[in-house]
Image: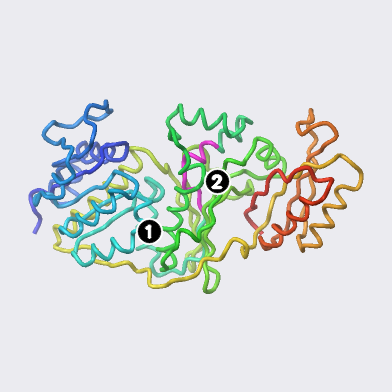
Amino acid sequence: MSRDQINVGIIGFGTVGMGAVELLETNADWIAQRVGSRVVVKTIVDLDWKRERRYTVRPEQQSTKINDVLDDPEIDIVIEAMGGTHPAHRVVADALKRRKSVVTPNKELIAKHGAELLNLASEAKVDLMFEGAVGGGIPIIRPMKESLAGDRIQRIVGIVNGTTNYILTAMSHEGLDFSAVLKDAQVQGYAEADPTADVEGYDAMYKIAILAAIAFGSHIDLNSIYREGITRISAADIEYAHQLGYEVKLLAVAARHHDALDLRVHPTFVPVDHPLAAVNGVFNAIFVQSDPVGDLMFFGRGAGSGPTGSAVVGDVIDCARNINLGASARVPCRCYLNLPIQPISEVQTRYYLRTVVKDQIGVIGKIATILGDHQVSLVSIFQPHLEENTVGEGLAEIVWITHQVQEAKIQAALQALDKLDEVIEVANLVRVEGK
């Protein structure tokens, strides 16, 4: 039997928390029809209520004490919107133990402690939902857990960080270097004052870990995921990518190869005819290859008050419906495997290699010989013709595109190139998507 009212407490009233509250209150009548009960935001906890916000709430909703939510027996659902793991981990665990359902978009928390928290939720017979943790407003967690539950997922590759995609898109369209675009992204509010989590790939790593755990039913050791950010990508790399028929994207990759997983985050040359190549700005996209359904792509805004707030509210509605039904997901963590993650040295892919060399006869032959000696086969050799020499008098740039090769072999080749007198610098090495 449906209750007249289901109460929600929110901890954290920043971008995501504000988006969730605004949607819950603005669409209250519509949500009540969907749930069969009024869903009411009773208490909102934040440390700073003097800060000006786009959406304001009533004084009686405001609190600075987390226990005003945790200790309130009338609050049925807790939205954790603080971010990070401390004190979020303790707060979520306490809420679950007190038999309150929890909704969180906190990707770091779920990536690091999701298995433990799901088991706590199952024991308490309440829900833990986290659709907003990956892809913002893009529905991806629920389709992976439900719609594709009977499929055998083979590979996931996605653009899952809006900040880095905005930066790379601006670099691509405007021909600017990373540092200049980053400053603009910070001014525009697309990048944090400390952008490390985004530009060094941590945010994308947490997200691909969550997707991989769901897709492959395996515990994921975050320390085993190869992670590389976008800080070494230059305007030259992007220009050469265009000339060769690619766009540069920060990709998160998850695949299962027999009894091991390939999990990595790094910049990638993506062929212009690949669906992910056209995903620009702050948009995210996740490409899933599954048997028997085939190829699927999930696309949309990956962050922000509206998109992530939408995902949070969708989870709140599911929790509220379950409360009315006297049920919950009650599913403990289904990560029943402990598949090893391949070290990056064993991964096989294609590569873009940019070298700065002495502009002398025979240099290309010497480098090609070293690559061949290390079983690195070449697709093409490209010497850019620029209006001005940007690498120095008597020097030249040469770009190499390889066939698929094991990472260990190309790294050994790079060590040999470092010893070649004619090679001034190996300026960059970027992986290339596709066979």
Query: If the image is split into quadrants, where does the N terminus sit?
Result: bottom left
Q: For residue 424, what is the image quadrant?
A: top right
User: Element under label 2?
Assistant: loop
Query: Taking 378 as reference, is 79 above or below it?
Result: above
Secondary structure mostly seen in magenta is: helix
Query: Which callout, 1 or 2, points at the residue further toward the start of the chain?
Result: 1
Tell me if residue 295 can be seen.
no
Type of amino acid under label 2: Gly
Q: Which residues are magenta?
A: 158-167
From the top left corner, tell me how far across and down residue 283 is, in percent. 47, 41
| Residue name at image x 54 percent, y 50 percent | 251
Identified at 46% across, 30% down, the residue is 186
Residue tagged 2 = 229
Kind of residue sitting beneath label 1: Pro
Tell me which residue sits at (35%, 69%) in the image: 334
Residue on which the image places disc 1: 143
Could you give the CA–CA distance between mark 1 and mark 2, rounded to whole angstroms?
Answer: 28 Å
Front of the two marks 1 and 2: 2
Q: Quadrant of the C terminus?
A: bottom right
> Tag 1, which secondary structure?
helix
